[in-house]
Image (spheres, coloured by chain):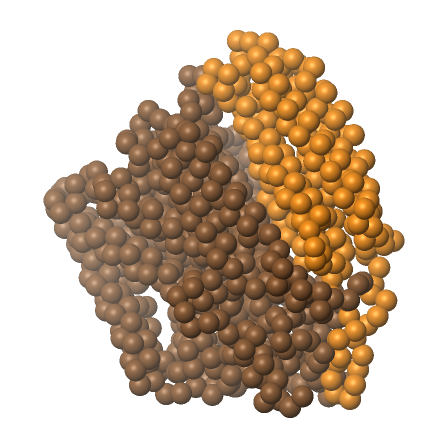
Chain colours: A orange, B brown
Amino acid sequence: MRREAMPASVSAVQRGNTLDVSNLPSYGFGTRSLMWWGTVGMCAIEGMAFGFMILIYFYLRSLSDTWPAGGAAPDLLWGTVNLGLILASAIPNYFADRAAIDQDLPKVRMMLVLGVLFGLALCGVRWLEFTALNVRWDDSAYGSVVWMLLGLHTFNLVTDVVDTMVLTAVMFKQPLEGKRYVDVAENAGYWTFIVVTWIPIYAVVYFGARF
Amino acid sequence: MSSDHARAELERTWRDPATLKGWICTLDHKAIGRRFIVTALLFFAAGGVLGGLMRHQLSEPGKTMLGPDLYNQVFSMHGTTMMFLFAVPVMQGIGLYFVPLMIGTRNTAFARMTACSYWVYLIGGLTLFTGFALNTGADAGWFAYVPLSGPEHGFGKRADFWNVLVNFTEAMGLMVAVDLTTTALKMRTPGMSLQRMPLFVWATLVSSIMIIFAMPTVMLGANLVQFDRMAGTHFFNAAEGGDVLLWQHVFWYFGHPEVYFIFIPALGFISAIIPTFARRPMFGHTAIVLSLIATGFLSFGLWVHHMYATNVPELGKSFFTAMSFMIAIPSAVQLFCWIATLWTGRVAMKSPLLFIVGFFVTLVIGGLTGIMLGSVPLDLQVHDTQFVVAHLHYVLIGGALFPLFGAVYYWFPKVYGRMLNERLGRWHFWLLFIGFNLTFFPLHVLGLDGMPRRIYTYSADSGWGPLNFLSWIGAMIDDLGLALFILNVLRTFWKGERASDNPWGAGTLEWATSSPPPPYNFERLPVVASLEPLWSPPAEGPREVVGLATNSREGLVTTVLDALPDVRYSYPSPSIWPVVAAFGVGLWLIWSIFSNKGMLIGLILPSIAFIAWYWPSQKEAAEELALEKRP
């Protein structure tokens, strides 16, 4: 069982016809935290958008005689570099999550700073990816759908990089409430979503026009 | 601590200051829910005036009050207003008000997000109507089909206003849906296991989850149209490899579930009202819960029945026909459970129940024409005729508006502490019921006779004049009924009879607190041991929760299945930033109508506001640290 899923070590106490909850913790990790549910909702919403965009890609591809229409498939280099980078970013992200659950502040700070650096590098390489698509968004429906897929993922990527920067700043502030560690864990959860969704989107953008 | 002292302290902690800022920034789910409901009803009135204009225009052949161009805008604005600005927000507003009360908690999970969502909704609605006032009203129908709404045929900025409205309303809907889902699953008072969760909360939960899986697609789709219009993309441009039918798929994948996330909360109202007026627990509680969930699932498999007249494969159409028939089953299961409850209860025929009976009759008619339209050959005969207009009004007015009025009569005393007048309520019901049937029944006949929908006039020799005139008379009677309702509300504020805490003798928790409820809802959170805690309170064991702070906004998070107390929760305190963020989003979206640069640069303002919203204040942090206990 994951540590954050364990039931509370203390529970509510019955006193006569009342239930005393004053001993309960004031925050919890994982599904115990409301933030977890909010993050899952956010991932479901964004995931629907990604999923539909991939469906639209194949729908349009199925109607088209030539795919990619009148051009070359995107160059593999930068997208693949980004795939490597984003998979590597999962490592500090994992340790940020662990450190948050252990409430180990120095380690949380270090992993967050690492996460921000990875995020900035990813944004930079993403810029290069757009230059290597070999198609403009207004060239054809193929160009539109490729730009949109990449753009949608970039929007989420940039949002989470900014979020992580703000969170890092908060973790260097005083006084620091314990529930900020939950925020770190949830931010790590959202970053995992960005990592995991990049794999199918990468496959579609770079290989949907090759096979 | 004495009870009076605790109440006074809770009052100090939870009451918003009586200033403009206090009013704007409030996080009280009751204030926000009320705001949603009142705003939605105002949009309903605006949409109703547009509907009345259409009935007047069609009341006799060859009328020239509305020209074809204005008529296009009027019917598009009517549908868009009713679906996006009235039906969904009003249902979510009622959920926001009553879910926390019914599950015995102090506020919703993400109160700041809900506060933000209200302003997003309001700004979106006002933007759409400002466009309309400037002859830039949406004019491609409420489903805004391309290529009519695309870059070549979408005139001026009309379609852009529609696309942006979709962003506003769906952002609002999604924020509220995530809030209500989390609240229903994680904030139920101790003892309220999922088996003991009231049916209205179930309905809200199911519809909220549906919203999370349906609304992102229409938002995405509207933005694709917008990119086609503004940035030269080709998603829907057949000449460059795009496809117009793609829009219909994207829209109806959302559009059909949308009908159901309007309808399912209404089923929740009915399941709240019937046991109260039958004076017995609901017959077949579990069957109703399962039916709600089944309806939610099946509603995602119906969308192609809006597209029978297109070239989708015939085999696909048969699948969607089967699904369209199948969804009648869970609705029928609920109907039979309600009938059984009423049959075996001691029925008190008060105005809320009267509206529910109106629902039974109307929805059954709408359901029957629905089964007709679900089959391909019949649909092809009456596609895009007045028959469809009749059907959709029978299901939406029958399925949602009648239960909504029932809910208003039922819960008004809780919200405002006064009873609506019973006699005026009965007049309201009968005028609405007769007027509604007179307005829309003739449209079935007109549709079978070949009268298309969305035409601004017709010639005298078509023979459609008399029935259209009858329909217009019906609309006038409807208006009279609605006027009586407004009169009833105003009269009640002025001299309505005071309501007790539980004037109908109901069994669920919203009636356990005063009418209207205090800002903190319950002095002590109740512990429950049954489905109707007011009818059968816990025989042994604890009855209420103690140990939550009264000098700080504190609540309780419980486990999903059994609602065991798990974590204490510090609610956020009021802040101006969610409101600023909503206005920032508004500025960004409105700017994006006119400029591609605005689409990018405009993002900066809401981003700053979102960061400021999150940034912890020293005071709050200190307050939380004082109550903090590590897990």
Q: Is residue B132 left or right of residue B34?
A: left
> Closest to the observer: B444 or B351?
B351
* Quadrant of the image occupied by residue A203: top right
Residue B36 location, quadrant: bottom left
Please tell me whether residue B55 is drawn above or below residue B546 in the rendered image.
above
Kindly tell me whether residue B301 is visible in this rendering. Answer: yes
Direction from residue B467 to residue B30 in the image, left or right: right
The N terminus of chain B sits in image quarter: bottom right
Up-down relation of residue B372 to residue A47 (above or below) = below
What residue do we see at 55% from left, 73% from top?
B14
Q: Position of residue A190 (x, y in %)?
A: 68, 43
Residue B392 visible, this orientation: no
Image location of residue A148, percent across then percent down: 54, 27
Q: Nearer the viewer, residue B399 or A104?
A: A104
Decide which of B77, A156 is in the foreground and name it.
A156
- Whole-percent x and y of residue A97? 78, 46
Residue B277 screen position, x and y as percent: 49, 81
Which quarter of the figure is the C terminus of chain B placed in?
bottom right
Which residue is painted at 55% across and 9% down in the image? Answer: A71
- Please, is residue A135 above or below residue B249 in the view? above
- B311, above or below A143, in the image: below
How many marks the image carries: the answer is 0
Identify the residue at the far right of this view.
Answer: A1
Q: Which residue is located at x 57 percent, y 37 percent?
A: A49
Name the residue located 84 percent from the left edge and 59 percent from the top edge. A6
Instruction: Report the front residue among B540 and B523.
Output: B523
Asked where in the image residue B177 lies, by quadrant, the reply is bottom right
Say whether residue A209 is left or right of residue B250. Answer: right
